[in-house]
Amino acid sequence: MPPLRILVVEDSLLAQQILVDIIESDPELKVVGTALNGQEGVRKTRELKPDLVTMDLMMPVMSGQEAIDQIMSTNACPILVISSNNDSQVAFDACSRGALDVFSKDNLNPEKAEILTRKIKLLAKVKVIGHIRPRTEPPASLGTNHREKKVVAIACSTGGPKALSQLFAMLPENYPHPIVVAQHIENGFSGGLVDWLNQVSPLNVELARAKDRLAPGTVHIAPPEKNMKVSPGGVLEFIDRDPADRYAPNCDVLLTSVAQAYGPKCIGVILTGMATDGVAGIKTIRDQGGLTIAQDEATSVVFGMNRKAIEIGVIDRVLPIDRIGKLLVEL
């Protein structure tokens, strides 16, 4: 089987060479071209038709964001953003434009090489489509009968930031239930995700901290450095990550803890993402009498963890991402 063909778009010659060396250290990958700015990246994507593009963001002539817009409009292909932690908020804006995931420039070293090459090989096989303009609707309004307090627990991975932004945009500012989220993310990027979601959502989005208490209308985002749990009293707790965890934070740990703490008052949502993390957790929610919802294939960047949950029969509703927001309001 021929190696996957990769285009590297990076204006720093040093970072570009490091990326090329890491990528070509894997025999299943081949760098077919490099570009020093977004404009050149757009042109070479059209000419070379790579299986995946690695994209820097802050570049001369044309930024990475503009390049992603053009690539997804004319020659859609998988894009992995390579960004510094300082640009993390901009990186998630790039995900909303069509990039699949983000990798930290701080991790461009031999120790993290296998993590990057594995991510590239997974993302290069994702079938992407060009821009679909989302329907813009105001947040749904709440009725008056929402006295029974519930907890919404969300698991997501690849494609999750964009899905979360679409979902939260549908919820009103006075949403009465707390929301907890385990989104697979690299260390150092969770603060940027929180800042970006606060810009695109009427909800209050916070980076979770130990001993925080769940609050109505607040989204508590789990940081990746530890695994997050919710106690029966609605207080956030953190435990050390298991060395066997391939993805962080662990979705199963969070969803299982919410199921055990809230039982039938829990709503579990599993969104786009690779692998199976979150499937066991959402099964526990179903077993405890909670409602379970999965994002459908058509609106998922990667129909993986949600597909597995559907296949094993633990999902009550399968819905497009915009309809999930409406359902959370109706409930």
Image (tube, grey):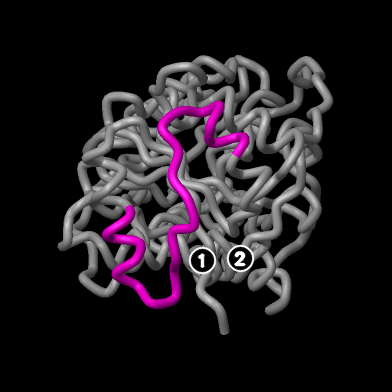
Q: Given the current orientation, which residue lies at the most extreme bottom position?
A: 1
Q: Position of residue 238 (x, y in %)?
A: 23, 49
* Quarter residue 177 falls in: top right
Residue 190 inside the magenta-drawn segment: no
The front one of 71 and 237 is 71
Q: What amino acid is labelled 1 in the image?
A: Leu
- Whether the magenta-drawn stretch holds residue 30 is answered as yes
- Decide which of 279, 265 is in the foreground and name it: 279
For the residues labelled 2 and 1, say whether their Cβ atoms are less than 8 Å apart: yes
Location of residue 76 with respect to 258 vertically, above or below: above
Task: Please name the residue shown 58% across and 18% down the image.
Answer: 200
Instruction: Measuring from the top left, give residue 107's x and y in whole percent.
Output: 22, 49
Residue 291 is left or right of residue 195, and the answer is right
Q: Which residue is mark 2?
A: 125
Are there few (<14), some (14-19), or many (20+) residues within 10 Å of tag 1? few
Residue type indicated by callout 2: Lys
Span highlighted in magenta in the image: 20-43
Q: Is residue 135 visible?
A: yes
**SS for dot 2:** loop
* Residue holding disc 1: 122
Mark 2 to mark 1: distance in Å? 6 Å
